[in-house]
Amino acid sequence: MSSRNPDQEYSRRDLLRAGIAVATLGLGRPAAAKAMEPREALKPVVDQFRVGLQSYSLRGFTSDGKPDLKKALSVTRDLGIRFWEAYPAHIPVTLDRSALRMVQDQLEAHQVRVIGFGVVHLGMDEAENRRIFTFARELGIGYLSADPDPGAFDLLDRLVEEYGLPVGIHNHGPGHRYDTIDRIAAAIRDHHPKIGCCIDTGHFLRSREDPVRAAEVFGTRVYGVHLKDVKNAETFTVLGQGDLRTTDFLKTLAAHRYDHCLAIEYEENPEDPRAEIQECLQELKRAAAPLTVD
């Protein structure tokens, strides 16, 4: 992999400025999240918004036809990104301690932290759900993005309370059971506050829903963001070339003290999306500029 050029340094310098701006507005991170910070060498490049990547974006970097964790982490490091919501094909669910140690070693070597995980299916099998929750706890993951069965919410109420691990319902595209804001809101109503929504901005746009309204409706129950853009409810684009009101979306997240992974997800060009991800980072810097306080 070639070394980073000066034009890529915005991922450290300018996004930090955007994060400081939010902290200046009095929206600093809660103490519980501060306690999760790694050693100084892995200090986040962003304060309030922990800008990361949904590792599904890098599924095309493979070995033997399967997504390769080491390759994806190397690309992530070279992009200047330090946080992941990990795609299960990169880090399969396991309770094997040697396998977990190998994953942790790879993450530390590349200075990447997995702070979210998914999208996972959570059904009526309590033992399998517990396996997923225990795996997440062992890796220090902060939330799960999930596609829960409608009948599983009473069980999830108990698990999120016991493990202290939030679950965000991931909205899929049009026609899915969780495709609209109101359907997700109805599903989580009267359930534990640690059950909320993982906002996929692109899929909400495909469903002709406004992601800004989603951030307003779910408020402090936003657990995960897949940040992507769509034009005319049809075509996935680089961030800023579709219909997402990115600045308004960021302002709404900041107003509710959003503290989980702000994960860029670029699904197109899976073979090598690095240039497009860099464009998304540049657009995110631009969109965050109005949050900056001199």
Image (cartoon, rainbow, N blue to C red):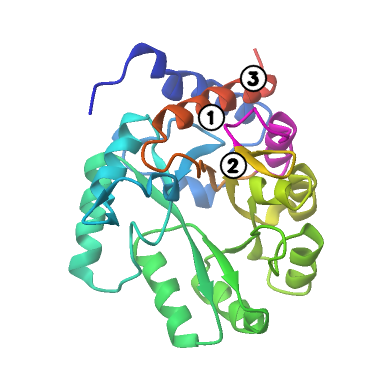
Q: Residues within 10 Å of mark 1 (few under 14, many from 20)?
A: many
The image's mark for residue 227 is 2
Residue 278 position, x and y percent, is: 46, 26
Residue 284 position, x and y percent, is: 58, 27
Which amino acid type is shown beneath numbered disc 1?
A: Cys
Q: Residue at x 71, y 59 (%)?
A: 174
- Disc 1: which residue: 280
206, above or below 274, in the image: below
Region in magenta: 237-257
The image's mark for residue 9 is none
Give the Cα distance between marks 1 and 3: 14 Å
Is residue 189 one of those drawn in magenta? no
Q: Residues within 10 Å of mark 3 (few under 14, many from 20)?
A: some
Give the Cα distance between marks 2 and 1: 9 Å
Sequence-first tag of 1 and 3: 1
Describe residue 62's horizontal placement relative to residue 217 as left or right.
Answer: left
Which amino acid type is shown beneath numbered disc 3?
A: Ala
- Disc 3: which residue: 289
Give the Cα distance between marks 3 and 2: 17 Å
Q: Residues within 10 Å of mark 2 (few under 14, many from 20)?
A: many
Q: Residue at x 71, y 36 (%)?
A: 244
Q: Secondary structure at mark 1?
A: helix
Q: Secondary structure at mark 3?
A: helix
